[in-house]
Amino acid sequence: MIFHAVEAGPVDTMGYVVADERSREALIIDVPLESRDALLALVRDHDLRVVQIILTHGHFDHVGDVRALSDALQSPVAVGREDGSMVEQPGSILPGFGLQIEGVTPGVRLEDGDIIACGDLHFQVIHAPGHTPGHIVLHEGREHILFAGDVLFHSSIGRTDLPGGDYDTLMRSIVERLLTLPDETVVYPGHGPSTTIGFERMHNPFILEYLEHF
C-alpha cells in the first residue's frame, strides 16, 4: 500500500492519498484548501491513477480545493448523501469567513455499507453522523486503517456546534460504529496526529465520560 498525508489550509486540515501498489489505483480522501499542488505532485511522482476523490464530509476546510483537483485529475467526487448540498455550496454554512470556495456537484452519493475498491484495497463506507448529517468514515479491514474525518481525533472528538451537528448523535457514532472495530485499527483523522481505536477506547476523555453514563 502507498500512503501519504498532506496538511494544509487555515485550520491545518489533513488530506490523504492511499493507493494499491500493484495496480497504482489511488483514492484521495479530503482536499483541504491550498492542497491541490501537493496532492497532484504525489499523484505524479508515484505514477498513480486516481479512481475517486472522497470527501468525509462537506465542511469548507475539507472541500476547499476539490473543484480544482477534480478538474485537474478528471476524477469523480464522492461524499455521503446528506452532505452533498454542502459540497455544491461549501460556503453556505459558514458565512462571514471571507473565503471564496468553488463547489462541485458530487458524482457519487455514498451510503452506509458501500464498498469502494481501489486495486486490492477495499474500503467500507460507514455512516457516522454527528459532526455533519452525512459524515462518513472509511475502513479498510485488511490493512487495519480508518479514515475518520472529523468524528474522532487523538484524545478528542469532532465539534458539534455547527449547523447539522449533534453531540449525542456523534457519541453514538463513535461508540456504536467506530469502537466496534479492532483495537489495532489505525485512525487517520481530519486534523492532528494519527491514533488507534484501542488507545481512544482506553484514554479518550470524551469517550470515557460518555461511557460512564451510556
Image: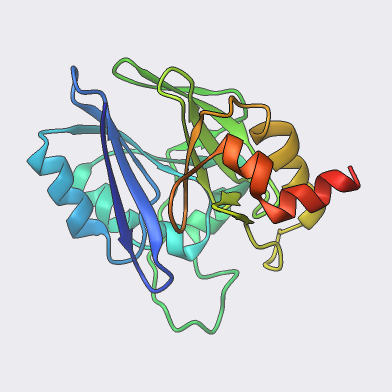
Q: Quadrant of residue 162?
A: bottom right
Residue 132 position within the rendered picture, expressed as x and y whole percent measured from the top left:
65, 54
Q: Quadrant of residue 27?
A: top left
Residue 136 position within the rendered picture, expressed as x and y whole percent measured from the top left:
57, 40
Q: Is residue 112 left or right of residue 89?
A: right
Give whichever of 51, 23 is nearer the camera.
23
* Quadrant holding the N terminus: top left
Identify the residue at image location x=58%, y=41%.
199
Residue 180 position within the rendered picture, expressed as x and y whole percent measured from the top left:
68, 27
* Quadrant holding the C terminus: top right
Q: Quadrant of residue 36?
A: bottom left
Q: Is residue 169 left or right of residue 124?
A: right
Q: Quick check: 92 above or below 169?
A: below
Identify the residue at image location x=49%, y=82%.
97
For the image, the number of numbered tags is 0
Q: What coloring was used for the rendering?
A: rainbow
Q: Quick check: 10 above or below 180?
A: below
Identify the residue at image location x=82%, y=49%.
210
Q: Quick check: 176 above or below 174?
A: above
Give whichever of 150, 108 is nearer the camera.
150
Q: Is residue 207 left or right of residue 159?
A: right
Identify the residue at image location x=47%, y=53%.
190
Q: Is residue 52 left or right of residue 210?
A: left
Residue 90 position within the rendered picture, expressed as x and y whole percent measured from the top left:
49, 64
